[in-house]
Amino acid sequence: MGGLSRAVRDGDLVSVYSLVPRFDNAVALRGDVAQPGRFPWREGMRVRDLIPDREALLSRDYWIKRNQAVGLDSNVTSILNQQAATGTRLSVEDLNQRRKREGELDATIGDTIRRIQTESEAAKFLDPNQTSSAVEVTRLQDASKGTLETAKADAQRLINQIRPSQREINWDYAVIERLNRNDLTTSLIPFNLGKAVIDGDPEQNLLLQPGDIVTVFSKQDIKVPVSKQTQYIRLEGEFKGAGVYQIQPGETLRQLVERVGGFTPNAYLYGAQFTRESTRLQQEKTLEEALNRLERDIQRFNTLRAQNVTSPEDAASLKQQAENQQALLTRLRQIRPIGRIVLELSESPQSKDLPDLPLEDGDRFIVPPPPSMVSVFGSVYSESSF
């Protein structure tokens, strides 16, 4: 007798093994794609069968962020986030749910809406660089009350939102991970994604095997050459076409100004300000290192002085001096570098005098109008402006 009918005796050891979590005849797709997951494998399957077109590389987050750009109703936002979380496909009927009272909503969608009724809870589902309709309304109300700082922050936030809505695909590189059944080693098989999906190049449209894992990367995952990066610069002030512009490969500051039409007749180029994000970060790091070094020097100096204190008056004086030095350090740590780069212009420069400075993502060039007054301050009898 055998199997389940076998008699069990005292001292027998019965082991029950779980199923091996292995997927036969399947390939996996992951990374920056519309629908990551595991798909059935078939004989003769190739990369282009798994990624048929460009649309297959637009993630769900892309559409959510595109729709949030105009400030969605909270109900619609919750529906979109539910779609991304559960993998369900959004239908017109789902969007129409927002026109109904909450009690009439579909149970699943209604539960989602109720979970994120407050703005603080909704923020957990939204991209931190985006704002919901409730925040948009509040900001507009503050601006209507004449709150200048709120209006400036709103304009700054709007400009900062001019960014790629999608993590841009690295079309030059994708990879297949394949397990060698003979020695159980994993090999990487790179291919050109653009040639495989867009051009249908048979040399890049590789044949897939069961168990393969295809990974699609973005330009943020693996840094690509500068010429293939999407970069933006802000031109503000006395430009004929002030705004946010995409930097062309190899473009310099002078070339960009000429491309947008140059300056207005009222431009005061000598007072221009050019700032760069990478420079600001470096300045912050340098300033922090200098302040840390200064703090160590002050502590060492005060320690040496404390060893020579012989009276209560000296101790009180040393304590007061240490407090003053600490207050100075606190004020110095509040300084925030802006990343300004000196252009070394003459007193009456023109656009042709701008340097051929290579541009980077996040650069900002501000050209003010001529100043209308002169301020006098410092060691004078009367500080004033004229």
Image (cartoon, rainbow, N blue to C red):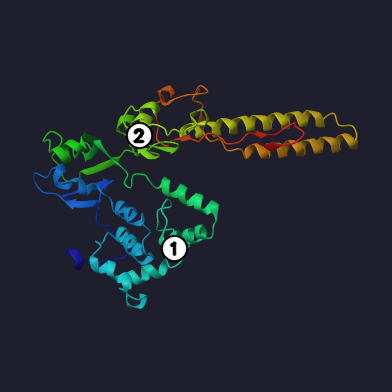
* In this picture, residue 259 sits left or right of residue 383: left
Quadrant occupied by the N terminus: bottom left
* In this picture, residue 26 sits left or right of residue 116: left
Q: Quadrant of residue 181?
A: top left
* Nearest to the observer: residue 141 or residue 352: 352
* Disc 2 element: loop
Q: Is residue 348 visible?
A: yes
Return the disc, 2 or 1, that comes first in the chain's sequence: 1
- The residue depicted at 32 percent of the width and 72 percent of the height is 99
Q: Nearer the viewer, mark 2 or mark 1?
A: 2
* Disc 1 element: helix
- Compute the Cα span from label 2 to label 1: 36 Å
Q: Amino acid at mark 2?
A: Val
Q: Amino acid at mark 1?
A: Ala
Q: Which mark is residue 260?
A: 2
Residue 151's spot in the image, x, y percent?
Answer: 50, 53
- The residue depicted at 78 percent of the width and 28 percent of the height is 304
Residue ID for mark 1: 134
* Nearest to the observer: residue 68 or residue 346: 346
- The residue depicted at 32 percent of the width and 64 percent of the height is 79
Residue 149's spot in the image, x, y percent?
Answer: 54, 51
Number of residues whose C-alpha sits closer than 10 Å to that of mark 2, classed few (under 14), some (14–19) or many (20 or more): some
